[in-house]
Image (spheres, rainbow, N blue to C red):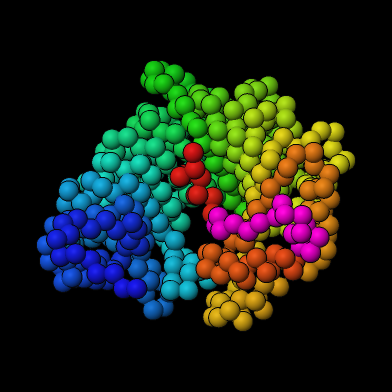
Amino acid sequence: MPVVLPLELHELIIDQLLYSFLELKACSIVCKAWLPRCRLHLFRTLIVRPRIFNKGYSEPFGCEYQQFFTLDHSFITPSIVFHVRILKLSYEVQTPFGLLPDSSCAPISSALIPVSSMITIPFPFKRLQTLHICWRSVNWGGVTALEKMLQQIDCLRHLVIEGRWRFRVKEDILSSIALHAPGLKTLCLAKLQWFPNSIASTFVEEISSRWNDRFYEQGVAPLRLERLCITKSTSKNCVADLEKVILPSPCLDLSNLRYLAMPAGTLQEVIHDTRFRTLGKQVTHLAIVNLDTSTFKVDSGSFPVLSHLQLYIRKEHDLVQFLHIHGASATSTPPWVRMHINFEKHLNHRLKNREMIAQSYSDIIVHTPSVDLALHRFIVDCEVSMQISVHFAHLDGGEPDIQHDYIREMFPQSFPTGHLEWTDRKSLEWWLDHN
């Protein structure tokens, strides 16, 4: 039934606004027309993205960012931005049909993002709890711009940095975060890619040593993180020295981690390194963002209190191999009771109706019995009551009945056990709200 908002309403709380000039103006007009006595339009979440032109070229994000803070003061007054808790500054190119693949995006020069504008514009979001920075260009102002933002936030809890990391002696991002965001509990370095793409190992170690010496000289306390997420770029030229630069950094205290997400290959090297003996001791939720090795095994010695395991699957064979290693052939019972399986294959076209949705499910996973058989054996052989939830990356939960029917059809042996269910968890970011 239709709901009429009372005219006496004085404050309107908008949970999320995907920013554009048209949406801002439309929101303001609607609020003033239908809520004449409403004094404030309060936003919990703001997502700022560049506009898209007809030919697919995006407007320089630095200009868009600058206009956002100067165009309409009704959306940037202290009483309004005081309530913003989540801010995402994104340079992802998006159309009404969703994010464009990298191959179809027009190249965006780093010169299109004026560093000066990112540094000099006042950053009014004092009460931010989550800051998500996603830059496609490497020249986004670096540590200087990040420090300017962090200095103006009272108590940041969650920080997500997405994009390339430029190796420079003066740009120690971890040290800057520890200095200017001492209350940080969550750090996510997503799609991490060193720049330039090829760096000698000795050079990396030298830079890391200089960063560490400088951090000790400052006398800053290390960040006592509770959640750490590191995902590597899929680029073949990506240099991923996570165990040399990030994990051993004195800026981070990882002894109290409750959530850990990283590729299997890196995790396999780390858990056998004596420098990281306490890394998984308090972890209750482990996310394997890429099964890039077939020999990785989650054991109770490395993760004694683990209760949730999350897998991001791109190839069926990886999942089958993982289940085989942790099933009856393993030397011990898996040290977790809930497993989340995220199938990362996306559909290439929009879903128009229920018939097309049902027809297109065959594109998600190849119709082979190997996954179902491996899941069934794993469930039956486990000595604990295992609960497995399945998620498909492109779905938003709008058609749960169809999704359940699909799972029942795709996993005819596993589904009747009662241990298999569907979930609508659709990204790495849900754990930001997870206790």
Magenta region: 411-426
Foreground pick, 160 / 285 = 285
Q: Count the numbered circles shown.
A: 0
Foreground pick, 310 / 87 = 310
Magenta span includes 374 = no
Above or below, 14 relative to 333: below
Horizontal placement of 272 versus 393: left or right?
Answer: right
Above or below, 320 relative to 95: above
Q: Main secondary structure of the magenta part?
A: loop
Residue 52, position as x, y percentages in the image? 38, 71
Above or below, 96 relative to 397: below
* Quadrant in the picture for the N terminus: bottom left
Residue 161 visible (yes or no): yes
Q: At x 26% / y 47%, what residue is drawn? A: 83
**Of all residues shown, which one is farthest toward the right?**
329
Write down the quadrant of residue 62 in the picture: bottom left
